[in-house]
Image (cartoon, rainbow, N blue to C red):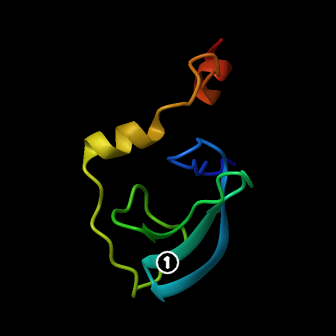
Amino acid sequence: MSTYKLVCPHCHGKMRIRSSDGTHIFLRLAYLQCTNEVCGWSCKAQFEMTHELSPSGMPNPSVQLPKAPLSVRRTAMKRDSDNQMDLLEAECA
């Protein structure tokens, strides 16, 4: 499992989510704060679900997102590190 790294645009320190509000099934408003005490910058952010990359194994009929284009799905499937072997590559090796 990976976590999304939020970086302060001012000091490049880590940001933390102080609180968040769900405004819609696909939209969440978050209030962020830099963890660098000297910087202390804070902001409001929006996290929006925009496209489906793969279907759910437990589909909810009320969830209707457009399917992502193939180029977006390929980008999402890229590994962070070229040193990490793909599971299928490991089986064939």
Q: 73 or 17: nearer the eye?
A: 17
Numbered disc 1: secondary structure? strand
**Residue 92's spot in the image, x, y percent?**
62, 16
User: Which residue reaches farthest front?
Assistant: 38
Q: Residue at x 71, y 51 (%)?
A: 38
Q: Residue at x 25, y 50 (%)?
A: 69
1 sits to left or right of 67: right
Q: Which residue carries the number 1 mark?
A: 29
Query: In the figure, 74 relative to 61: above or below?
Result: above
Q: Residue at x 66, y 22 (%)?
A: 91
64 sits to left or right of 9: left
**Residue 76's spot in the image, x, y percent?**
43, 43
Choose top left, top right, bottom left or bottom right for residue 42. bottom right
Q: Residue at x 64, y 29 (%)?
A: 87
Q: 52 or 40: nearer the eye?
A: 40
Query: In the figure, 69 relative to 19: above or below?
Result: above
Q: How many marks?
A: 1
Q: 69 or 27: nearer the eye?
A: 27
Choose top left, top right, bottom left or bottom right for residue 32. bottom right
Q: Amino acid at mark 1?
A: Leu
Query: In the figure, 66 relative to 9: above or below?
Result: below
